[in-house]
Image (cartoon, coloured by chain):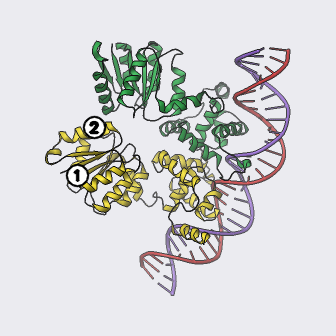
Chain colours: A yellow, B green, C red, D purple
Amino acid sequence: MTILIVDDEERDRLWLRNLLSQGDFSEHGKIEEAHDGERAVELANKLQPALIFLDIKMPKLSGIKAAEQILKNLPNTGIIMLSNFQDEVYVRQLWKIVPPNGAFGYVLKNASNDQVIEAARAVLSGDCWIHPGIARVIQRTQNKATNLTTAEYEALICISVGMTDHAIAKRLYLTEKAIQSRLKSLYAKLGIPGRSEAQETEYNQRCRAVFVALQRGLVNQSELQEWDSKISGTKGVIFDTPQAVAAAVQEEG
Amino acid sequence: MTILIVDDEERDRLWLRNLLSQGDFSEHGKIEEAHDGERAVELANKLQPALIFLDIKMPKLSGIKAAEQILKNLPNTGIIMLSNFQDEVYVRQLWKIVPPNGAFGYVLKNASNDQVIEAARAVLSGDCWIHPGIARVIQRTQNKATNLTTAEYEALICISVGMTDHAIAKRLYLTEKAIQSRLKSLYAKLGIPGRSEAQETEYNQRCRAVFVALQRGLVNQSELQEWDSKISGTKGVIFDTPQAVAAAVQEEG
DNA sequence: GCTTCACCTAGGGTTAGCCCTGATCTGCAA
DNA sequence: TTGCAGATCAGGGCTAACCCTAGGTGAAGC
């Protein structure tokens, strides 16, 4: 049985390797390492490991995207994601790429040694193991009242990088009114009181929404940076929503 | 010579301990450990170590505050701060508490082993060692055109947690016009174009300012969380500016 | 003394963003 | 088919947030 450890930080690779070799995992096989996502995909296809530890934040190819490519060829691979943060963004993304009955794990990097071992065993025997710290995050992504639609999520990202309603509307091929409508329901789901609620505490909803989203891990710093360069750098469609694609095509033709 | 390692993560303590014992640091003394800021201050006063490694983000007492207390009693202690992020907030805070000619270091946690050793040697021989990654951050804190005043920084924090101009003014015992004035110069220093500049890209300055500040590390997530609870929880003065204190006293009396 | 600089204040104007109602269209399910 | 729910769009009202100019204060420095 081969285990693949993928992380760009030497310290973390070392930590996992020591941990795993203390258990009985390495008895029947080897532990291999990769430093980035691209190499991880290569090695996974070559070695067909039973278990892969994948750091999320890596150069070249993120852990999420690497997992997507690996699972395309080898859907039975057990994958354990490693993350520093309990970010809802990542959980959202991960949920989309794992096969319905696939076994995967999600452990935070401050996990105890026992927890990592536990997660490894669970995934190897076909179960999932989710770090307790992000249990409520998962729940939130499945609760209808708090789970954001793609439309609301788009709007959130746009205001987070500082775009105006007008700029967002142009970007998404919608009217400003539509954006305001999206924002309104976004604010509601994030639980931000409006002017009419006459609360004690006054909020600038727009900024408050960004703040709350940040605290909940709906967006995070490095994700936002990517979005910012994507939005300011190029022209055309950002999100692959049907309307946007249609409008973009129509405009060019 | 005694060395003190302060970090709430076992993995990082282990990493440092191994690293230091490989060098020639532990020959003439011991390496001690602490798990949080309070314990660090205790141990520092008791052991009077020549060198202290301090993680910034810790429970009970942050590394910055711990350093402040330690340096009060033992100004000649060499202190090396450890941080995950190259955040300008921390550099700002640190700059205020270190003695003018004190020796200190600032290393990021993704530093190589050699860099840590190098930093330790430098600080022990009375020099400073700053991680290359934050060199430009330091430069920015000393550049007049980009360095924020305390007033602008206050305003930045307030809009970052989502307060309105009105709420900020009430909180800081100022007029809304004063807040707007602060914000205006803040936007200028952050390089955010206004409506009048008629740029291609339109920005909501308020949100954009938060975004830029976040990317530069002028504010960060955990800092903002603290500010938020401080602001929404209590009434009265937030920042210790003279006017605010005076106004608060006058109001009560 | 004077100058400089950072900061607060003020007034008056423009606009973006939030609020409400209501209409249209879609897809989904009873 | 009917009804329900969601998303989009519209118009009109309101206020917070930005823009400009300009005067006043206090501290630091020549």
Q: Nearer the viewer, residue B173 or A229?
A: A229
Looking at the image, the residue that sits furthest to the left is A27
Q: Position of residue B140 (x, y in %)?
A: 59, 31
Q: Residue at x 51, y 49 (%)?
A: A224
Residue under circle 2?
A14
Q: Amino acid at mark 1?
A: Ala
Q: Which mark is residue A122?
A: 1
How crowded pointer 1 is (Cα within 10 Å; few <14, some 14-19, many 20+) is rated as some
Q: The residue tagged with tag 1: helix, strand or loop?
A: helix
Q: Position of residue B78 (x, y in %)?
A: 42, 17
The relative height of residue B167 versus residue D13 in the rendered view (above or below) is: above
Three-letter code for the amino acid on which mark 2 is drawn: Leu
Instruction: Single out the mark in the foreground, 1 or 2.
Output: 2
Q: Position of residue B233 (x, y in %)?
A: 53, 37
Find residue B251 and report its horizontal and vertical position in percent. 67, 29
* Chain letter for mark 1: A
Q: Secondary structure at mark 2?
A: helix
Q: Quadrant of residue B112?
A: top left
Q: Report crowding for label 2: few under 14, some 14 to 19, many 20 or more residues within 10 A (C-alpha).
A: some
Whether residue B238 can be seen here: no
Along the viewing direction, whichever of A100 and A42 lies nearer the viewer: A42
Q: Residue at x 67, y 53 (%)?
A: B200
Task: Report the quarter where the C terminus of chain A lies.
Answer: bottom right
Between disc 1 and disc 2, whose residue precedes? 2
Residue A117: in sight, yes or no?
yes
Relative depth, front residue between A85 and B246: A85
Q: Residue at x 32, y 17 (%)?
A: B25
**Where, by quadrant of the figure, is residue D21 drawn?**
top right
Left or right of residue D25: residue B7 = left
